[in-house]
Image (cartoon, rainbow, N blue to C red):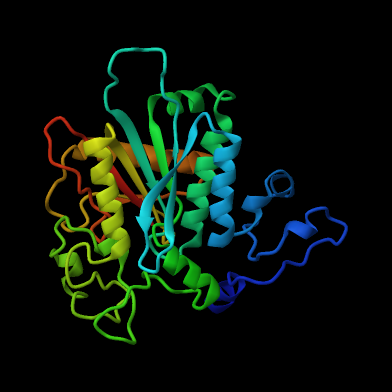
């Protein structure tokens, strides 16, 4: 990148973008910065022509449910530290022609926005959700994915921080939770989960609330991390859900990462499957992006870990994109 400062400046929200006054899109374009989509894409899908603030994302998600009620449902993960809803959508088609008890529903969780400033992760979660939803009944492959799995999309786990990046500090990373130091707010959600919380990856930041990687004083002190964990536990214990996949999207570097993050020496269960899945994903990204390559490696620096109950019959896949 030749001019980092200019690149950051261009990513700031602006009242409007300079566009052709004769364009029918002019009255809809109220938020910068452009995602640089093609003209045909902008003409058919205004929502993805720009990054969108939370005040636009939330009603857009409600609109999707209204337009596609057969396979889109609203979920509430809980409330953030400042009381904002952590919105999610469950996408999937459930069989209704069988009187037999159904097995636990295989579910894949797709998460973005843990780090507030990583706007593209939120936009990507929304785009993947939109692609699956609108392809049902049109694409055999997509339709089968919705019949075989439920997909839970959480565009931003950190709505307080995301809003703060739009209204105050574009480069804010953490949530907006108060710490022991009045002038140093925020906890790093990625490092706030309970599994191996006291590992080497977080020990250097534990005592410094001003650090961008501050995990808090105890596991699950971060409100949003706690809400996600409790929601996932409730889904598995009470709602017949079996989580089989987890994609955690970030926006730094070109990497596909897989567990563990707390240790580079301990091997996670199903390591071969994790490696194969990560390499397959990197290949798919390369083939569909014009040759863009991604490094495949272990996430030895603070990704979200599984808090599901340990079971010999239970499999899980956790990946983080950075």
Q: Would you say 5 lies left or right of 280 here?
A: right
Q: How many marks?
A: 0
Q: Would you say 269 lies left or right of 98 here?
A: left
Residue at 34% x, 51% y is 320
Residue 310, relative to residue 163: is it above or below? above
Residue 138, relative to residue 128: is it above or below? above
Residue 189, relative to residue 305: is it above or below? below
The image shows residue 252 at horizontal and vertical percentages of: 42, 62
Quadrant assignment, res 322: bottom left
Quadrant assignment, res 309: top left
Residue at 50% x, 42% y is 128
Asked whether residue 52 appears in the rendered view, the answer is no
Residue 34, relative to residue 102: is it above or below? below
Asked whether residue 71 appears in the rendered view, the answer is yes
Q: Nearer the viewer, residue 76 or 159?
A: 76
The image shows residue 130 at horizontal and vertical percentages of: 55, 41
The image shows residue 8 at horizontal and vertical percentages of: 55, 73
Q: Nearer the viewer, residue 219 or 34?
A: 219
Residue at 48% x, 72% y is 164
The image shows residue 299 at horizontal and vertical percentages of: 26, 55
Q: Would you say 84 lies left or right of 230 here?
A: right
Q: Nearer the viewer, residue 73 or 111?
A: 73
């Amino acid at each position: 990148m030749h001019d980092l400062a200019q690149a950051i400046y261009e990513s700031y929200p602006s009242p409007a973008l300079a566009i052709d006054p004769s364009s029918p899109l002019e009255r809809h374009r109220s938020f910068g910065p452009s995602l640089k989509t093609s003209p045909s894409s902008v003409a058919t899908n205004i929502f993805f022509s720009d990054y969108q603030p939370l005040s636009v994302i939330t009603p857009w998600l409600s609109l999707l449910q209204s337009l596609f009620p057969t396979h889109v449902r609203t979920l509430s993960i809980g409330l953030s530290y400042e009381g904002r809803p952590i919105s999610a959508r469950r996408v999937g088609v459930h069989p209704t022609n069988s009187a037999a008890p159904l097995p636990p529903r295989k579910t894949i969780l797709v998460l973005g926005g843990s780090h507030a400033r990583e706007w593209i992760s939120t936009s990507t979660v929304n785009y993947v959700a939109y692609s699956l939803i609108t392809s049902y009944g049109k694409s055999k492959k997509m339709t089968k994915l919705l019949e075989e799995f439920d997909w839970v999309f959480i565009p931003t786990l950190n709505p307080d921080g995301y809003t703060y990046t739009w209204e105050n500090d574009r480069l804010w990373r953490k949530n907006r939770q108060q710490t022991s130091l009045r002038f140093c707010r925020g906890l790093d959600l990625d490092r706030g989960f309970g599994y191996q919380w006291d590992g080497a990856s977080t020990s250097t930041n534990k005592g410094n609330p001003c650090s961008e990687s501050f995990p808090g004083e105890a596991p699950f002190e971060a409100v949003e991390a706690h809400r996600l964990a409790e929601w996932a536990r409730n889904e598995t214990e009470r709602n017949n859900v079996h989580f089989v996949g987890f994609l955690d999207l970030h926006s730094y570097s070109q990497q596909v990462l897989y567990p563990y993050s707390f240790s580079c020496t301990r091997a996670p269960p199903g390591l071969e499957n994790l490696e194969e899945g990560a390499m397959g994903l990197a290949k798919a990204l390369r083939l569909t992006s014009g040759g863009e390559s991604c490094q495949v490696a272990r996430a030895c620096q603070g990704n979200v870990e599984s808090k599901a109950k340990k079971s010999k019959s239970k499999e899980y896949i956790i990946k983080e994109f950075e």
